[in-house]
Image (cartoon, coloured by chain):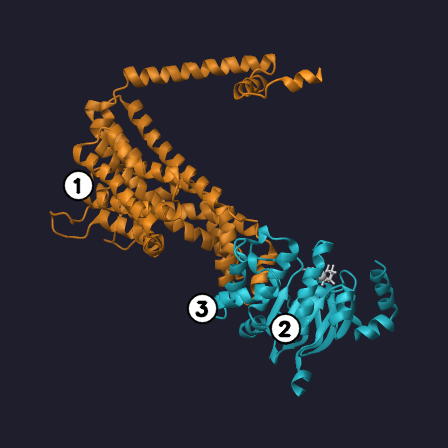
Chain colours: A cyan, B orange
Amino acid sequence: MTHEAETIISVQDVHKWYGDFHALRGINMEVKRREVIVIFGPSGSGKSTFIRTINRLEEHQRGKIIVDGIELSHDVRNIEQIRMETGMVFQQFNLFPHLTVLQNITLAPIQVRKWTKQKAEEIAMQLLERVGIPEQAHKYPGQLSGGQQQRVAIARSLAMQPKIMLFDEPTSALDPEMIKEVLDVMIELAKSGMTMLVVTHEMGFARAVADRMFFFDQGQIVESGTPDEIFKSPKEERTKLFLSQILSH
Amino acid sequence: MANIDNVLPPLTERSTILRWLRKNLFGSWLDSLLTVVGLLIVYWAVKGFLTWAFTVAEWRVISANLRLLMIGQYPIEQVGRLWLWLAFLAFLAGNSFGIWARRSWLAVGVLALPAVLALVFPFEGSARNWLLALTVIGAAGWLGGWTKPEVLKRSVIVGWVIALPVIILLTHGFSESTTGFWTVARTNLWGGLLLTFLLTVVAILFSFPLGVLLALGRRSELPVVRWFSVLYIELVRGVPLITILFMAQLMLPLFLPQGMTIDRVLRAMVGITLFSAAYLAENVRGGLQAIPKGQYEAAQALGLSGAQTMIFIILPQALRLVIPILVGQFIAVFKDTALVAIVGLLDLVGIAKTVLAQPEFLGLQREVYVFVSLVYWVLSYGMSYLSQRLEERLGVGKR
Ligand SMILES: Nc1ncnc2c1ncn2[C@@H]1O[C@H](COP(=O)(O)OP(=O)(O)OP(=O)(O)O)[C@@H](O)[C@H]1O
Ligand SMILES: [Mg+2]
């Protein structure tokens, strides 16, 4: 079981500025293999910025980020390496509209991992089974519902066989009746042992599978703890206030 | 009263046409007046033209010079080489239709076109036979593509890729001996529609990748690349094509070492290509700007490299968005090639001028230029029509 306790993401005193605006102010976080982390906080608090520094969609200006033993630096090879090991799911799905569902999923494995088309398609079909929409394989993204598109996006990330999955508000662009089908896929993924960082305000999801939760405000981590600690006895006033706002809905 | 409406028969087509006429052409006094005046003008112009075309015009100037207008002074002995590549193209086109556009009237139209031309226009005997043969060869290709699409797909694509080199090689020839089928035909003998076609095809095929590179360069993060692209695009777009052609013909020799010459046709091709690339770059840039940032991010997050992201994700979407504009640009290139006549090349327009310089055809400008315009119009419209069909096809499943 020592394997499980191994740190896979280590974030040390990370700062990020957009021009003069100090968006991340000294973030520290250690994530262990198989852990599920939920990040929440008010709009503009830096949640997206933070999660996007982990696969270098945003560059940080101070501090250290180490993913699976590789430090993020200007070295392009390190960035490529880390992007191969992390999958990301976006609020707006960002599927490729000119490719079929199957092509969306197989493109990166074929081009980046250099798998044969046959192998990539086999694995893609298994993943589509897993997210529950194998019959949509030959459609284009525009022909699917939002919930189906997001499940394709998850399958597309998983096809690269990442060790870590990053989710940035994966359900907040969805109609309410489609949220559950996406959360179910994510819960199944969490239970299968995937390391996950999830920015979300779906507190049901946090209760069900999160190991730890981080509350962000104004570019800082204000409070962190297990779901029990956060929901039952939050220490900070800001956390209490924010939780009461989102839970009252 | 409402009951009466219910029992009236449904609108017939006739009555909708009447309604349309009434609404659009005779809606008010002023509308009616404009319509009547407009009709009178059209009637007068069309009548004038038709009267001229069928009673006054001396079309013999076209039939007597048809060969000149089509291929200029291209040597008679080697004309078979042109028919060879036309046959190659007909076969490829037939194959492609058979594979990708099975049941389309368009295919029938394109493949039947040579035969129709042969029957309608006064081509000489061997040309007529070759035209008929093109349709037969095209039909054979179509049948082949239809019956064995999977086997042929690859070779058809290869065929299109090597088409331009094949055309150039066959047109140019390669044997140094003074007579014979494969003897080199110097480019100063290339003329008429043949030259217009070659200038257009070369300019389009080379300016397209160049334009894409310039468009990417203009968005590059490397300042040198970006500034070079911007400078190039703005410089070229700021001058008329004719000045570039003059520079290529008159200035370039000044910079070349003594005794070294570059073929005049080649210089014109380069000039038009460089010119058109700047415009294409701006068109492509428009398409690139329309692609949301999320597409880049998703591709990066999957580990695709910058080049892979461009090739597989961004360019296919961006280019699809600008197909109509690109085709407009290609048609403009086709028509712009006519400017080479001013620097002394004998393209369709240049040849027309030499035809008119012959004493026996003096004063027949109208016939010749009406014919030349007709050729330009038919080919331009053909390109535009084909592109519309292409858009319809590519539109499937888009967002
Ligand atoms: N590209 C950018 N340029 C300038 N400022 C930015 C940029 N991206 C984000 N910001 C600013 O950084 C701050 C943090 O943004 P971020 O998107 O990380 O917030 P968030 O917590 O994800 O909010 P939300 O819940 O609205 O998604 C915000 O104030 C935002 O305005
Ligand atoms: Mg956000």
Quadrant of the image where one finds ligand 1: bottom right
Earlier along the polypeptide chain: callout 3 or callout 2? 3
Q: Residue B243: horizontal and vertical position, in percent?
A: 39, 41
Is disc 3 in contact with disc 2, using a CB cutoff of under 8 Å? no
- Residue at image mark 1: B75
- Residue at image mark 2: A164
Q: Mark 2 lies on which chain?
A: A
- Residue at image mark 3: A116
Q: Residue A155 falls in which quadrant of the image?
A: bottom right
Q: Nearer the viewer, mark 3 or mark 2?
A: 3
Q: Label 3: how many residues lie within 10 Å, few (<14), some (14-19) or many (20+)?
A: few
Answer with left or right where residue A77 lies relative to residue A33. left
Q: Residue A113: horizontal and vertical position, in percent?
A: 50, 71
Answer with left or right where residue B226 lies relative to residue A233. left
Q: Which chain carries label 3?
A: A
User: In the image, is residue A187 above or below residue B20?
Assistant: below
Residue drawn where x is 64% and y is 70% of the image: A165
Task: Report if residue B385 is visible in the image.
Answer: yes
Q: Nearer the viewer, mark 2 or mark 1?
A: 2
Report, in whole angstroms, how far the alpha carbon at label 1 lies from the one at label 3: 52 Å
Q: Residue B27: horizontal and vertical position, in percent?
A: 60, 16
Q: What amino acid type is highlighted by mark number 2?
A: Ile
Q: Which of A123 and A153 is in front in this view?
A: A123
User: In the image, is residue B2 above or below residue B218?
Assistant: above
Say which element carries label 1: loop
Report, in whole angstroms, how far the alpha carbon at label 2 lies from the one at label 1: 70 Å
User: In the image, is residue A127 above or below residue B226?
Assistant: below
Disc 1 C-beta below 8 A from ligand 1: no
Q: What amino acid type is highlighted by mark number 3?
A: Thr
Q: Residue B4 falls in which quadrant of the image?
A: top right
What is the quadrant of the N terminus of chain B in the image? Answer: top right
